[in-house]
Amino acid sequence: MTTPEAGEVFLTAGDGGRLALSVLRPLERRDEELPVVVLAHGWGGSRRIWSLVTDRLLRSGFPVVSYDLRGHGASTVGSSGVSAEAMTADLATVVSYAGGAPIVVGHSGGGFAALSLTAAPGPGTGPVGLVLVASAAHDQDTPEKEAAMMEAPLFSWALRRPVLGRLLLGQMTGTALDSRSREVNRQVFAGTAPAVRAACFRSSRGMDLRAASAALRIPVAVLAGEKDKVIRPELGRELAAALPDATFTPLPGAGHVLPLESPDAVVAAVLRVHRAFVGRSRSDETVHRTGSR
């Protein structure tokens, strides 16, 4: 596996858009080369939402590639606009740049793209494991009233006011999240263009990845905050139960923004997926050598 050089990078999406990436390597060299972890944030977020997770992953020895979804952060929208298909294609571009065989961690809408990419892989290599954080495979038909609110001038005005914005987004998180992290969540959400926010919430209408994902043959960890009011935690439980090799971890008291609320749980899930991948690889090698099961 090949890890790209550390630094800030712009990749060109299939429709000409620019995808902003951060590539980070652990400071200490280890005997065991660990796979790259690709981090895909949720709608209205940015790479910044992963800061606590990134630090913990680097300390655990994993190289990390995080990127801004199209239209978010420093990434542009591209000529095809914001759609589920475009975001999945963007993730495929990032995975290829990351060496082709990473562990992918997807939060919320980033999880939709991760599951879509892995359930319908293209030619070549793909993710060796998934961590789906506050995500789902279906039942994401956002009512038009809610989608329209995302681009309403009054809502955007309120998001730009720190106290009012934190109050508006308070239902996204559990009660234990500290005020600084709540402000980070507000800043990244307010910093996303209103039209992009609305397009994202419209993009998942009709999404149903259950049948396609049932054939996944890689380890998957699914995390859900028990107080999540954005994506019902039951959907995460159902998803994990339907996958051939998945675990489900409910997080008491946590809401939707698990990268900020429960970074240790996210990293623990990455470690579990990595161990499962290594165990499976060794088992496959044994079968290959002996020619039997």
Image: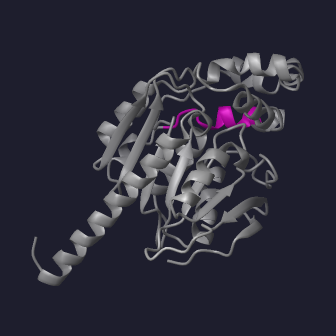
Can residue 276 be seen from the camera position used here? yes
Q: Nearer the viewer, residue 101 or 147?
A: 101
Task: Look at the picture and state if 148 lies above or below 283.
Answer: above
Q: Does 160 sit above or below residue 17? A: above
Residue 10: x and y in percent read 78, 65
Q: Is residue 175 left or right of residue 289?
A: right
Residue at position x 26%, y 71% from top?
282
> In terms of depth relative to the viewer, which is nearer, 33 or 256?
33
Q: The C terminus is located in which quarter?
A: bottom left
- Magenta region: 197-207
Q: How many marks?
A: 0
Magenta segment, prevailing SS (helix, strand or loop):
helix
Against 52, residue 89 (above or below) is: below
Q: Residue at x 32, y 58 (%)?
A: 276
Please check the rendered image and state whether residue 174 is part of the magenta-colored stretch, yes or no: no
> Residue 92 versus residue 174: which sits nearer the camera?
174
